[in-house]
Amino acid sequence: MRVVIVFGIVAMSLTAFAGEQNGKPSDKGVQVKYDAKTFYDTTSYFGASFSGDEKRLLITSDASGVFNAYSLPVEGGEFKQLTDSKSSAIIGVSFFPHDDRILYTQDEGGNELNHLYVRETDGKVRDLTPGKSLKATFGGWSHDLKHFYVQTNERDPKFFDCYRHDTDGYVRTFFFKNTDGYGQIQVSQDGRHVALMKTRTNADNDIYLWDATAPDKAPVKITEHKGDVQHSINTFSPDSSTLFFGSDENNEFNRCWSYDLKSGKRKVVVEAKWDVMGVGFSWNGRYRTASVNADARTATTVLDTQTGKVVPLPKFASANVTGIGFARSEKLAAFYVNGDTAPSDLFVLDLETGKHKKLTSSLNPKVRQEDLVDSKVVRYPGIDKLEIPALLYRPHGASAQNKAPAMVYCHGGPGGQCRVGYDPVIQYLVNHGYAVLAVNNRGSSGYGKTFFHMDDRRHGDVDLKDVVSGRRYLETLDWVNGGKVGVIGGSYGGYLVCAALAFDPDAFDVGIDIFGVTNWVRTLESIPPWWASFRDALYAELGDPKTDRERLMSISPLFHAKNIKKPLLVVQGANDPRVLKVESDEIVKEVRANNVPVEYLVFSDEGHGFRKKDNRIQAAEAYRKFLDRHLTGR
């Protein structure tokens, strides 16, 4: 699996373009356009932890307008809201094994300093990781269910240590001290083995094993290799005899390997002509899941390890099955289904009968699914004729006689990927007549390690040229108005927006930058302390600000803002720890000095991504008005 080391995973990062009507159903065959509020009355759901009695599921939803934890019956029925945050997002983690206590995590206003909390059965809440400026994550349950693991950086902001908590009473024991900069930490269910990831560069890392029964002995490297090889920790087997990990050793794509903890033997267990994204198991190992990144779509399989047969999953046209989780009895499985025209909905599968049940309906019933658009996987030539993969969305009614304006959409990263699945940004655009080309420029995940590393130390150059080539491709389509094409992106995609306007000023007609990097020197010098284990990989990918300062300045749009002459909208969260607000402040100031139209929207209660519905709606309205004024003149 490719490791996106910075600015890549952006929860709720991009809001959407809105229309002018209220979504009232029209005559059959006539497309309805929807305003922002109608579209954002769609509800988000994710996560699924079975209760001890397997009658309920713990999930996370923004039904209240802010993400909170909810429970819902496995048989279907009314939701029960378990937390009531009015500001910072709460993410449900897990039910306790034998009662209705829950674990959840929460930061403050998007600052990413998450703490781990327990909600008791009487509703009282306890912070299990108190303190300032620390970050904590849940590390899983022990097989006897008497303990759970938590990782925090309270001892050293740069590195995460591992603690073991008692299920009853929450007594905490220091379990593993991380003094050597390990990034990923995974504990076997028997509590004896700890798998650790150590990163050297963005192309090379290693997995180590530490034996908790011999705590004075140093972790042992188990992935000796020659050259650059990327590894990732998947999971231990439920009986704690085997480690499963990803590796691209001797292969263009990531494969899943097993490592026998007793003999040290390893072998390939899952491979495909695409990256194997991950492998997991049900609690006792009866079922094994595997997910493959198949040309920007998730292909998931479930294997019955007792029979060796693949478990048939429900068939959903043009959709992804993701997030499979099992009840401890291994009688039930929960999973999500989503596609371009359908947000994630939760299903439960009876593994004994094969019957499944849909538990949620996320899409606002006022939005007709036929008004949305499925993407088409396309490939277009880059500047050197390299094929660039992308997802193309064609608005209803777009034709040679009714040409559509268009937007080129840039994903986060570097190293992210535009993937099939519901994206409110894109669906809003398309709903209001904009074609969208979601580009997977060289450097994107999912297309092999050669393609992934083509942009190393060449950011703002080859990747940007692929984005500009996206416009040239759109101009060849007879149903696209090639004279009205803009560019939009969030995070690293926001950087590409500003880079396009600064380094190729005539390539696009407008730009929408959503918390994009504009000064690489500052960004790399101010990375959050908890990214320390990935620092060398970051510098290998982008450059070291101490030694590559001149080159980093040369690719930073801020220092070339005088070239920007096309209208720009900038959107930023004030609490963003990854791309500091000052990045957006400065680019806005510099471009305004050019007498170029610049609009600036700051959310005081958001970080690197917009989690509140009201903020997403406000941003959507800003996008629509900006495009109306500066691209289409509607």
Image (cartoon, helix red, strand yellow):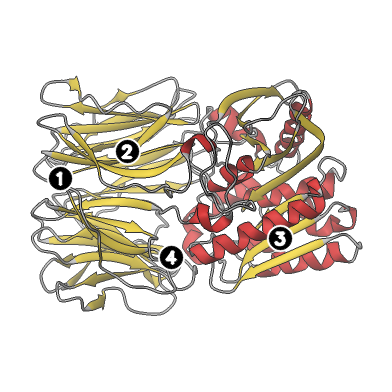
Which residue is depicted at the point 15% across and 45% down?
A: 327
- Which residue is denoted by mark 2 in the rendering? 222
The first of marks 1 and 2 along the sequence is 2
- Which residue is denoted by mark 3 in the rendering? 570
Q: Is residue 37 above or below residue 477?
A: below
- Which residue is denoted by mark 1 in the rendering? 327
Percent position (x, y) of residue 150?
27, 63
Q: 291 left or right of 353?
A: right
Please name the amino acid that badge 2 sits on.
Answer: Ile
Which residue is depicted at the point 55% across and 38% down?
A: 418
The first of marks 4 and 2 along the sequence is 4
Element carrying mark 2: loop
Q: Are marks 4 and 3 in contact (CB under 8 Å)?
A: no
Percent position (x, y) of residue 376?
57, 26
Q: Are marks 4 and 2 in contact (CB under 8 Å)?
A: no
The first of marks 4 and 3 along the sequence is 4
Q: Is residue 258 above or below residue 464?
A: above
Q: 619 left or right of 459?
A: left
Which residue is depicted at the point 74% across and 51% down?
A: 627
Please name the amino acid that badge 1 sits on.
Answer: Ala
